[in-house]
Image: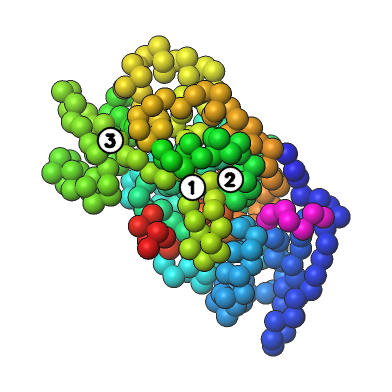
Amino acid sequence: MKKLDKNIKRQTVNLAPDELIKLEHFTNSKDLPLVISPDINNVDLTGWSDANRKFIEGKLLLNGAILFRGFNITTASEFERFGLAICSELFNENGEHPRTSLNGKVYTPVFYPSDRKLLWHNENSFNHRWPKKILFGCRQPAAQGGETPIVDSRQVFQRLNPKIREKFIEKQVMYVRNYGNGLGLNWETVFQTKNRSEVEAICQQNFVNFVWKPDGSLRTISVRPAVAKHPQTGEITWFNQAQHWHPACLDTQTRESLLSSFSEADLPRNCYYGDGNIIEDSVMAEICQVYQELEVTFPWKQGDILLLDNLLTAHARNPFIGERQLLVAMGEMTSFADINN
């Protein structure tokens, strides 16, 4: 696991009309994130970003992640203004995750127990549609831990055993979800309706198969690509959430509890190869090991903003102690159909 190096290389960037910001890199310049910080006092990050959006976009495509540090943006309204300066639009929450709306299209992070690690993932990559960009803003760092590790998804693809990689490319990933079984969200919350016909229409629009079970609960099945080709850079990235859905990736206590309470078919979440065959535990262990080896982490500072290209960079969340307040926004929704055209 890599941490930010204190001995970073610095390069002052002159952007007409003034020298306003500086770029910082890891000692190994291939590492992410790129750090952008003010070179003079009182730089208006939103105004600068609005005027230099193409510059930011180019750096994001190259690095996959940008950390804006020292601009002291801590309110939801300021964070949303910045998001709209660098994204053509921000995503309006769809109920998929238990978040709280703070301001317009700014939310709290998805709830997950603070004593456990939320594993690496590319946001919503199990869905047909997902955000091209995701932003995190730090209002208050945790007393201990709570970092947001990031991983270059291009390197994950390159580092994986070619046999594993090719099998996933050929077969894709099948995601199976059971709603309303006492764990996780029920289908009424996720789909934001109590009308079954509306649920079925949403599933059909998003290429999701569905089964209404005898007790009135819902099971959905969808097959998605395991990799994606970035529409602007042409690079292939490892783009799926198998490690979020596969039981082998759960902590031992949670996994044993679930397997003792549910049949395999009724687990809240599970995933398979796209043909329905089981993904071997050993394969998932190898995938998680690659993520762990490539993980880059840094301590949050109040006012930080982390911008990710969701196709190029996966993110996670470390366990933490104390109160942790982050802002989240997602921008520029796209789909597998969009990037494959």
Colour convention: rainbow
On the rendered image, what quadrant is the C terminus found in? Answer: bottom left
**Residue 29 included in the magenta stretch of the image:** yes
Q: Residue 337 is drawn in which quadrant? A: bottom left
Q: Position of residue 8 (x, y in %)?
A: 82, 58
Check disc 3 and give the amino acid type. Thr
Q: Is residue 174 left or right of residue 143?
A: left
Nearer to me, 335 or 68? 335
Tell me the residue at 41%/38% (across/down). 171
Nearer to me, 92 or 338? 338
Magenta span: 27-33
Q: Which mark is residue 220?
A: 3
**Residue 84 included in the magenta stretch of the image:** no
Tell me the residue at 46%/43% (across/down). 169
Q: Dot 3, how many residues are within 10 Å of its Cα: few (below 14), some (14-19), or many (20+)? A: some
Disc 3 versus disc 2: distance between alpha carbons?
27 Å
Q: Is residue 230 left or right of residue 181?
A: right
Q: Position of residue 276 (x, y in %)?
A: 35, 29
Q: Dot 1, how many residues are within 10 Å of its Cα: few (below 14), some (14-19), or many (20+)? A: many
User: Is residue 37 visible from the viewing direction of this image?
Assistant: yes
Q: Which mark sits nearer the N-terminus, 1 or 3?
A: 3
Q: Residue furthest bottom?
A: 17
Check disc 2 and give the amino acid type. Phe
Q: Dot 2, how many residues are within 10 Å of its Cα: few (below 14), some (14-19), or many (20+)? A: many
